[in-house]
Image (spheres, rainbow, N blue to C red):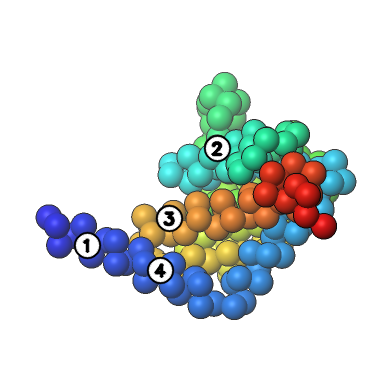
Amino acid sequence: MQDYIKDEINKTIETVQKLLSDKTTILLIEKIAKKGAEILRKGGKLMFAGNGGSAADSQHLAAEIISRLNYDRPALAAVALTTDTSALTAIGNDYGFEFVFSRQVEGLGNKGDLFFAISTSGNSPNILKAIKAAKAKGITVVGFTGETGGKMKDEDECDYLFCAPSRETPKIQECHILVGHIICSLIEEEIYGKKYNPQRQGKK
């Protein structure tokens, strides 16, 4: 059992090291954060969606934006499309599970928003439909997926596509929340750091 524990920890370390050494991905993360800050400054919002563990990540990251992450500051606009059970079950019942996110994007999304589409495989039908709905409304799309990219990569639907350097679902999810936290931190700092970050007070 201890060998398994060590192996899993080592696999996580190896995955993160791959991420760290990929200059293109580091630049991509920076671009996503800057785009998120730009959209929020202009009055847009961030939307998140995913299934299973990716649904939990959606709620987690939306909460970091709308509440706080590293320090007290004004709220920022973010919503997880995974939390309204009445909407999810109504849409699933009336139209089918494939439409549970796209229907919400159509109703809640506006041109100039940013949509985080999270799928470890890149093949989730409801995420792919949500991406199409977002693009149709002029919403910028950030895809979070695994190493292969799945259909999210093949269809070239995303404006920004982060492919975690792994094919194992748990490791992909670990990368997603790591990168998600970094993006949220950068957005928070870009918009409110100068005024609200206590570590920057008194610094020019």
Q: Which residue is mark 3?
A: 174
Q: Secondary structure at mark 2?
A: helix
Q: Secondary structure at mark 1?
A: helix
Which one is earlier in the sequence, the residue at label 4 or at label 2? Answer: 4
Which of the image's four quarters has the N terminus?
bottom left
Residue at the spot 36% in from the left edge and 63% down from the top edge: 12
Residue 153, horizontal then vertical, whole percent:
58, 68
Residue at the spot 69% in from the left edge and 60% down from the top edge: 32
Q: Amino acid at mark 4?
A: Thr
Q: Which residue is mark 4?
A: 15
Q: Amino acid at mark 3?
A: Glu
Q: Which residue is mark 2?
A: 59
Residues at badges 2 and 1 in contact (C-beta under 8 Å)?
Answer: no
Which of the image's four quarters has the C terminus?
bottom right
Q: What is the distance, in whole Å, between disc 4 and disc 3 at their CAs?
A: 9 Å
**Dot label at residue 6:** 1
Residue 4 to residue 82: above or below: below
Name, please, the residue furthest toward the left. 1
